[in-house]
Image (spheres, rainbow, N blue to C red):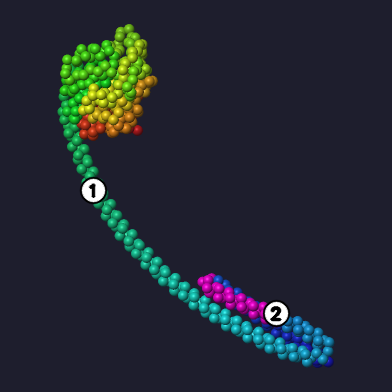
Amino acid sequence: MLKQLLKNNRAIQRIKSLKDLVLEKLDYLREATNYVKDVSLQNRQAIGAFTEQQTQNANQIMESQIFLIKSSLDQVKTLQYLIETGQERQVIFERMMAEHRIEIENIYQEFKKIREEALRSDQLVHQEFKKIREESERSNGYIHQEFKNIRGEAESYQKLLTGQFLKLQEENQAQTVFVQENLAQIAADVHDQKFKVITDPSYFQAIDIELMVYLYSCLPHRRAIDVGANRGDVSARLLQTGYEVYAFEPFPPVLAQLQERLGQNSNFHALGYALGSANETRSLHLVVDQTEDKIFDDASFYSSLTRHSLTEGLAFQDSIAVEVKTIASLHEAGILPDDIGLVKIDAEGFDLEVIKGMGDFRYPVVLAEFWDPTFPFGQTGAMNHLADLVPAMRQRDYRWHIVIYRIWGQHEVSYYCNSDYSLENSWGNVFFFQDYEIFSQALKWCNAIMPATYFAV
């Protein structure tokens, strides 16, 4: 009986050893399956799907075999119980052990089959890795060649741009030399001339008037309009030059003096209208000299259609109704001819309104009086600030202008071009031009006659 029990114990030990071996194999199988799964997931989707399917099959087999092993273990436990209960169970135990050996052999064969399939999967993955690496090497070679081509094209383009830049630089240098030579020639033509200045107050008038005289030879038409003619100083000088003059003076007593002075000249036409932006009736505000010595000579000069500020000693006192016309309406009525070469405006602060009345009519040269906002006459009510006149004329395609100005209380005269800036306490006339050649001639004359004003920071 003791021998039989020892024999049974040895059998149980062998079954335990077999059980440990089976579990060890199962652990190896799980590791192999996980390895195959990890490798397969890092590659193409098709290989991953194939390996996953194989892994699922292996898992199903393992689960079946594990179930069998568990069943076998249960049977072993049952056998142990039978051995303990008696020798009559020995035969049954040996038969069951034989059956288990067959099952274990089957499990081993299944393990072998799974291992072979895993090896085949590894070979397939290796081949796919090799194929992917070859494709990557070919792609890298293609990219390298494309990069080389692009770099070659960029170098060629850079050389081309460098050549063009050098060519442009040479052309700019040649152009700069040409411009400098021409400027030097212009400077020589203007500055190297010798001028003789003659002052005769009985004949020659202010610089502004003499510029109108100079422009006579540059204008396409020899007719002029004198707005705000007053006693006719400007009209008289223009008539002496050869202009045909249309003079406007709305104040009846002054108009009578004007006609008496210049009416005998067949080229002179006196008109008793005031000019503005609309055909209407307005009040002409009359100014009186309130100083003891009557230092303002003739206060009728300062009569205006707008009540603007005045200097000390002058005051608006009375007003009369006058008829106001636009220049455009007088052209349309045939009172003014169309071929006017020059328009002079001195409307005592109402100049911008006269310009607005031009309509679609344009003249080679238009000049208007301006007052700075700090000038005594321009502080309130004035409609002739440079900041307003210049934009209005630019809208009418007068692209160049010359400002001839004086400072209140000083005698010096200066000029500058193409700016709407007015110096503090300044006043004077601004000449507007549509044609650059006429502007250029006027600029040369100003440069020779008076100092230029330069603006600097």
Q: Which mark is residue 137?
A: none
Identify which residue, 185 or 341, lies in the foreground: 341
| Quarter location, residue 182 | top left
- Percent position (x, y) of residue 263? 19, 15
Residue shown at the point (76%, 84%) measured from the top left: 76
Numbered disc 1: secondary structure: helix
Residue appearing at x 33%, y 20% in the figure: 280
Query: What secondary structure is found at the residue carrying circle 2?
Result: helix
Closer to the camera, 412 or 100? 100
Q: Residue at x 32, y 10 (%)?
A: 289
**Distance from label 2 to label 1 (Cα)?**
95 Å
Asked if one can make out residue 364 in the rendered structure from this viewpoint, the answer is: yes
Residue 124 among those drawn in magenta: no
What amino acid is found at the position of numbered circle 1 in the picture? Glu
Which of pointers 2 and 1 lies earlier in the amino acid sequence?
2
Question: Would you say 108 lies left or right of 236 here?
Answer: right
Q: Is residue 39 visible?
A: no
**Label ID, residue 171:** 1
On the image, numbered disc 2 is attached to which residue?
67
Q: Position of residue 10 (x, y in %)?
A: 76, 88
Which of the two discs, 2 and 1, sits closer to the camera?
2
Q: Amino acid at mark 2?
A: Phe
Outermost front residue = 333
Which residue sits at x=80%, y=90%?
89
Image-based side of 455 in relation to 337, left or right: right
- Which residues make up the magenta segment? 42-68
Please state the horizontal and vertical placement of residue 34, each as a whole percent of the image.
Answer: 60, 74
Across and down, in percent, residue 160 comes to 28, 56
Figure quadrant of the N terminus: bottom right
